[in-house]
Image (cartoon, grey):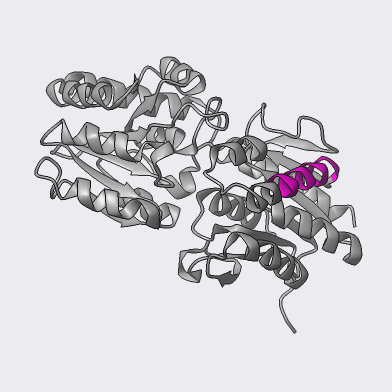
Amino acid sequence: MSRPVDVSIVTSGHDVADARLHRLCGALLRRGLSVEVLGLGEASDGPDGVLLTTSPRPGFASRAVLAVRYSARARGRVLLTLDPDALVAARVVGTLRHRRVVADVHEDYARLVQDRDWPLGVTALGARVVVAAAMRAARTSALTLVSDDHVPPLQARERFILRNEADGHLVGGPGPHGDAPRACYVGDVRPSRGLFTMLEAVAASPPWTLDVVGPVRSSDRAEIDRRCSEPDLVGRVTWHGRQPPARAWSVVEGSWVGFALLDDTPAFRDALPSKVYEYLAKGVLPVVSDLPRQAQLLREVGAGVVVRDAEDAASALRAYASDPQRRRAEMQAAVSWTRQREDASSAYDRAAARVEAVLARD
């Protein structure tokens, strides 16, 4: 007899290495729930202790088909979704098969559509239609998780704010800075998230090196290769590709600073990326763009630097390299701030308890 499944996490757009997916799975498993994940990528990158089904990343048109197929195949008594198209499909399947749905809305989907360089025409229209349908579904799901106060839907049947804070189970504790000045970046790698800004900052700040952990778009590879082959950067940037969370943070162990250089776009203006919390937890000093929420957080912590552009970021790197006393003091402030807060994993544990309560309604 096949193992019963309490929760199926269904995603047609997220790799099984995704950090939020790992944090959710860990919290659900700590509640004693059985979990399966149906997502993208390599099964070896998925969370431990769950049943895994993976698929190669589909094109935009194929995502909807995969969302329906995964939702129909899912065996969980509760379907937890991570994407707009998966949410729409899961609500249909859930209604037909009498299964409850939990919507994890970890981004403002409508603003995100505005940010992306969608082709004009049918694709852009299709994205807006799916997002509108997903927001209607999220408002009426059994439980709706949102990543911040301002993330829609602002009203739902049961709404729980699950911020993208660090999970010590995955990130690990702080470690000493290495002997050589070293920067890191963990996350999606694209120009709107500071790709070329951080390359220019490192280029202007020898002997700093940079480790980049995350997927790179094929459309950016030619420009990356060209820039990194120039004399001021050659041999100073290492690309690690997508990694599951625990492996990603082991790769960047010992880094002095971590970049979070978001463009000022509708989707990013009020964002607080999980990597900023994770850098702080590791004692890695964040170098962030001048956006309100990020700047406010660093002022509260007393660690890290807010910058306007690559020149500013380069100045910050040089300042840290020349002042080890300041670097140590800010590292201590980051670690102390993290420890003074409520256990970072507890928000995920409370969310898992809400999911367990949804199961109990059957």
Q: Check the image and name the residue furthest to the bottom.
A: 1
The one nearer the camera, 143 or 14, is 14
Instruction: Decide: is 37 above or below 347.
Output: below
**Residue 76 position within the rendered picture, expressed as x and y whole percent measured from the top left:** 76, 65
The one nearer the camera, 303 or 184, is 184
Report if residue 51 is visible in the image.
yes
For the image shown, how many numbered marks are present on the structure? 0
289 sits left or right of 146 in the view: left
Q: Main secondary structure of the magenta part?
A: helix
Residue 348 part of the magenta-drawn span: no
132 sits left or right of 168 in the view: right
**Residue 57 position within the rendered picture, expressed as x and y whole percent measured from the top left:** 53, 65
State the extent of the magenta-drawn residues as a range.
Answer: 128-140
Report if residue 176 is visible in the image.
no
Residue lying at 43% horizontally and 37% vertically, measured from the top left: 192
The one nearer the camera, 343 or 243, is 243
Residue lying at 81% horizontally and 31% vertically, measured from the top left: 155
Residue lying at 82% horizontally and 40% vertically, measured from the top left: 139
For the C terminus, give its image quadrant.
Answer: bottom right
148 sits left or right of 353 in the view: left
**Residue 152 position within the rendered picture, expressed as x and y whole percent measured from the top left:** 72, 33
For the N terminus, give its image quadrant.
Answer: bottom right
Residue lying at 25% horizontally and 42% vertically, measured from the top left: 254
